[in-house]
Image (cartoon, coloured by chain):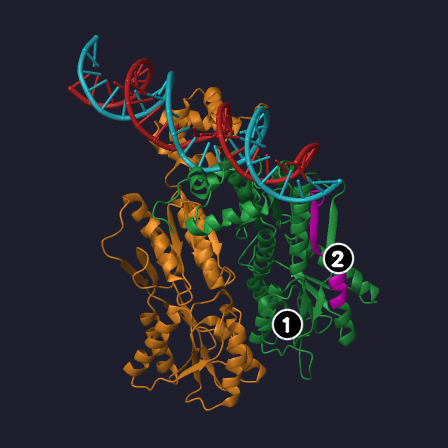
Chain colours: A green, B orange, C red, D cyan
Amino acid sequence: MAPPKIRNMEEFAAISGISRPTLSKYFNNPDSVRKSTRLRIEAALEKHDYRPNIYAMNQNRQTTRNIGVLVPNLADPFFNEIGRAVEVACIEAGYSPILLSSHGKPELEAENLESLRALKPAGILLAPFGRGSDRKAIDKIAKEVPLVLFDANISETGAAFVGTDNLQSLGLIVEYLCRSGAPPSFFEMETPANPNAIKRRQAYQRSMEAHGFAPHILQVKGSGWNFEEIGQVEGGAVLRQGGLPTNTLLCSNDRLAIGMLSAAYKLGLKVGHGPGCDLRIAGHDDHPFSRFTCPSLTTIAQDYAAIAERAATSLFRIIDTNERPATRVETLFEGKLVLRDSA
Amino acid sequence: MAPPKIRNMEEFAAISGISRPTLSKYFNNPDSVRKSTRLRIEAALEKHDYRPNIYAMNQNRQTTRNIGVLVPNLADPFFNEIGRAVEVACIEAGYSPILLSSHGKPELEAENLESLRALKPAGILLAPFGRGSDRKAIDKIAKEVPLVLFDANISETGAAFVGTDNLQSLGLIVEYLCRSGAPPSFFEMETPANPNAIKRRQAYQRSMEAHGFAPHILQVKGSGWNFEEIGQVEGGAVLRQGGLPTNTLLCSNDRLAIGMLSAAYKLGLKVGHGPGCDLRIAGHDDHPFSRFTCPSLTTIAQDYAAIAERAATSLFRIIDTNERPATRVETLFEGKLVLRDSA
DNA sequence: CTATAAAGTTTTCGCGCGTAAATTTTAAAT
DNA sequence: ATTTAAAATTTACGCGCGAAAACTTTATAG
């Protein structure tokens, strides 16, 4: 390391014996220079640890190498995992992801999109709230910046969508529950903000009818992101009240199921599929905690790694080709049944 | 809204009838201009929605308004909450927080610090890994940028530290457990990476001795951040093996306790303090899920709001006064006992 | 060895803003 | 009305880099 710190690219050019424009090319794309000069530059970099000023770099670039990644709530383990997977995919493709969370507040979504716009990102990967989303705000920014939706779909918005095939995944778990015991009732919130929840309800109905059973849907009050709380309080009320057609409950997502399991425990109900069990409870999403609930939770695992990968590559293609796809592509991955002790 | 979009501050100056240097002052500190002109600027802003180019803004500023916030793992609800609280504190103080997670990988910590350095932040709030942290990397960046540690302390590093008083909090829960039943054994990982874990063990020992009991520490194998898994597997082994001096277990943190609860459930052990219970289990941190475990978890709640607030204000003071405090201040907040069903 | 394209160099400009100095205007106090 | 300080304007420069044009060097092939 040299005592005189390098202040800018000009100084680094002087000390490394490479012209500044060539260095500029290198930093914007190392593959755009000849291999021999690339090695010379990298050798010099190791000796003097210079890094170009990112603010000056991005000032004149019409488009940066930043990718905005916005999810509704990083505190939700599902979004944490998928957000992380998307982040990794961006890094591997040579982009700089900026992962933002709206902390469960839909109004923060539009605000975060505005913040992202100020960063002049090359593209945006958005997992929208759905109903709570400001559709106009999303459409507006989608006009300026390539934008791909994932997890939750909003029709006709963004250049593409990648998510889970709720029709398939609900079919899978309804089939399992019917085959292994009594057909399930469906437990969900009254006014789900998330479009997946709505699709899951519809898929539940269709699947039940396909098996020749009458759907039975329990819709409870509650809004926001405190799903466990809602599952515990309202689910407990459902269990106390009784009158369920069968002993089997399918929850719209694992977090509701976790609350429901907690309520069942408090009521002294034994959950599971073994002998002497009072109740079967299943969820959806394979929440990281569903392996540690009491009993462990039977659920559907979403292929979040595939979703993240596909969403990212879809965006990169749009960025690289610099043209929006003619038709908006929707890609759905299948869920997998995860059998545990609760159902 | 006017059709001709404003491209830079000069155009906005022309259209708003305010000189560009005054606008520049306004954007860097709205209170630095007279109220009447501030209102004129803001009126013009509403009409033309111009926003200065952040890259050009930060290029010449020796220090930006960015605050880097780095936590070891945003997937951990505790860090998610405290990270969010820190974020809010920064926003309220007029800074732009940049929240980064090292995803449980200590080697990412140094990398993230480097990324933050490139953003020329006004300051950094760091919750370090502890043992896994690259102390030299932290010290290096702390020389350039005001840096305040929170949650986990690393002696003599950073300008200040804010965290929880583990001595007090462990004393509180050990006292409760001893008073309400048998004295607890302490369950933890063999080589905890986090300095808090080490302090908690020491605090447990002291507290037990103060109550006239012999400490009994169970150290199990395991590393990384899969605490629930470790609690389930290794905790289950401990329970099966038997030979515990009492029926009471105090876990080093809630996530271990959650795994332990899961193991106890699988073994058919009834956890709680009521009649007919086999085992008492307590944790530490008041994890968001500890209200929904079976049974709900007795634990210690850290005052993360206070920690976040104090860490942020400590940093702001250093930034504003532009001088490191003569002595490194360590602030510890008290934990609160949260009584639930598990102990 | 020569032709030719590819890659590197030199030179120059400008992005959008921060910032400083000198000057003029405005507002508050006498 | 006068004084005076505070605030706004005018003017000018430079930050660190992207980017383009014209020129020179290097590499590869025939």
| In the displayed structure image, the side of residue A179 where residue A237 appears, left or right | left
Disc 2, SS: helix
Q: Is residue B216 above or below residue D17?
A: below
Q: Say which residue label 2 marks.
A: A202
Q: Quadrant of residue B42?
A: top left
The residue that appears at 60% across and 60% down in the rendered structure is A78
Query: Which range of residues does the magenta coloring cover?
Result: A152-173
Q: Earlier in the sequence, mark 1 or mark 2?
A: 2
x%, y% of residue B261? 52, 77
For the residues labelled 1 and 2, say whether their Cβ atoms are less than 8 Å apart.
no
The residue that appears at 60% across and 64% down in the rendered structure is A255
Q: Is residue B268 magenta?
A: no
Mark 1 vs mark 2: same chain? Answer: yes
| In the displayed structure image, the side of residue B269 where residue A245 appears, left or right | right
x%, y% of residue A276? 67, 84
Is residue A158 visible in the rendered image? The answer is no
Q: Say which residue label 1 marks.
A: A297
x%, y% of residue A135? 64, 41
Q: Quadrant of the C terminus of chain A?
A: bottom right
Q: Is residue A167 magenta?
A: yes
Mark 1 burial class by Cα count in 10 Å: few <14, some 14-19, many 20+: many
x%, y% of residue A284? 67, 64
Q: As shown in the figure, which amino acid type bears the numbered disc 2?
A: Gln
